[in-house]
Image (cartoon, rainbow, N blue to C red):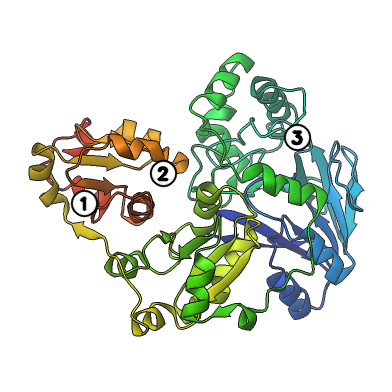
Amino acid sequence: MPATIQQIYTKCLAQGAYFLMSESEAIVIDPLREIDSYLALAEEHGVRIKYILETHFHADFVSGHLHLAEATGATIVFGPQANPTYEAHIAEDGEELSFGGAKIRVIHTPGHTMESTTYAMLNQEEKVEAIFTGDTLFLGDVGRPDLAQKGADLTMEDLAGILYDSLRNKIMPLDDDVIVYPTHGAGSACGKNMSTDTFDTLGNQKRENYALRADMTKEEFIQEVIDGIPAPPAYFPQNVGMNKHGYDTSHRPDLSALALSVNAFKEQSLEENIVVLDVRSREEFVQEFIPGSLFIGLDGQFAPWVGSLLKDIHTPILLVANPHQVEEAVMRLARVGFDYVKGYLDGGIAAWKASGGTLDAIASVSANAIEPSLEEGGLLLDVRKDSEFTANHVIGAVSEPLDYWIDPSMVASYPSNSTYVHCAGGYRSVIACSLLKKLGLSDVINVEGGMDAIALTPIQCAQSACL
């Protein structure tokens, strides 16, 4: 009996987990840390989760494999060369795993990392019907080859060459009608040119994915794959460590115990290394916020930005949120290993205001309003990625990608006039404004609508797409 496939896609992380069922058994591939959805699916369909398949040691999120194995008794499976420090089945290349009336074949596809593995679902005729490629093959791209475990005697050029061989020898010979299910899509830091689609046929990828060109030499592949790869976010190695060595599966924060009065919140905010993190919408934040707080809103790619900007998963955090957002914020922080939430402001900004607490704000202007100020010596900071800036930007703008935020000492070099900040649509620019305010820059102004709005104005840009 063939298996049914359910993709569980989490937009915040651009991450796809998979729940496969056949008869009375199921498997889960690359689960997130919160496992309730998988348990609910198993209960709904009356199936037992037999295997938890991990395509590799993930860097951009903390997997739920340990939680799920503990809750269900399922066996954790990795491919060849994986070396976790907890109990798991290390499968051999070509090994087949049965669940219900279906089979999964293990295909070792190193290159993104050395343990990276693709899982192929077989049909009744023992032919490959679908492949779950992890970070080996994305839609439109392949996995970045610069995340080898620390201590591995391999360069990213070495890994890219190994990935070339994996794709040519293990993936591309498969039939064109095979369905490709990757672990990530557009927005993930694990690749460069990923599609917004979440599955596709292998034949279509052979036609459209630059990395699968039939006439591509290994040397060309290596150069094109490594070209333009930015440094990985600082939290990546820490997440790899949690996924490889395990973590405290009993970690279940008691939200009621984390509620802090205004006075308690103020007192804790003065502690060393504490970060006051405001997760409300950007519209709410620019109007009023607690001085010194960092904005990263839940309405955007929250968890990846937390990881990129806070860097250390052990950072102690105080939350400012609307009451209905607290549980979600704690959960999404845990997805990327940030478990050190020390508390949240009980009653939110309303309680802070009622107690007479000081508030700050960020001025916002339309794109039409920035040109006169730039002519008078103001500074325009473009906080988009390098690739976005290269594609089109305002002439005279300074590129400061938010991914790898500015050295605090650089703020001293900014002109005393107004500093305008923009991104593509407005989310990243408000994050940047909050950081600049935190660093002591007072005259910071957010450009509403970002480059999307600037493109509709007469402002001169470096590319025709902006005119």
Residue 219: image quadrant is top right
C-alpha distance separating marks 1 and 2: 19 Å
Earlier residue among tags 1 and 2: 2
C-alpha distance separating marks 2 and 3: 33 Å
Earlier residue among tags 2 and 3: 3
Rendered view: 303 above or below 191? below
Residue matched to label 1: 453
Q: In the depicted view, which residue is nearer to us: 270 or 133?
A: 270
Rendered view: 154 above or below 194? above
Place of residue 124 in the rendered image (x, y in percent of width and height, measured from the top left): 82, 54
Circle 1 SS class = helix
Query: Which residue is found at the position 45% from the left and 66% from the top?
Result: 279
Query: Which residue is found at the position 35% from the left and 68% from the top?
Result: 289
Circle 2 SS class = helix
Q: Quadrant of the C terminus?
A: top left
Residue matched to label 3: 109
Query: Which residue is found at the position 29% from the left and 49% from the top?
Result: 441
Residue 62 in view in this figure:
yes
Residue matched to label 2: 402
The three-letter code of the residue at mark 3 reads: Thr
Q: Quadrant of the N terminus?
A: bottom right
Rendered view: 389 above or below 253? above
Q: In the depicted view, which residue is nearer to us: 267 or 22?
A: 267
Binning the other alpha carbons within 10 Å of mark 2 as few (below 14), some (14 to 19) or many (20 upward) gives many
The residue mark sitting in front, 1 or 2, is 2
* Left or right: where 261 falls relative to 459: right
The three-letter code of the residue at mark 1 reads: Ala
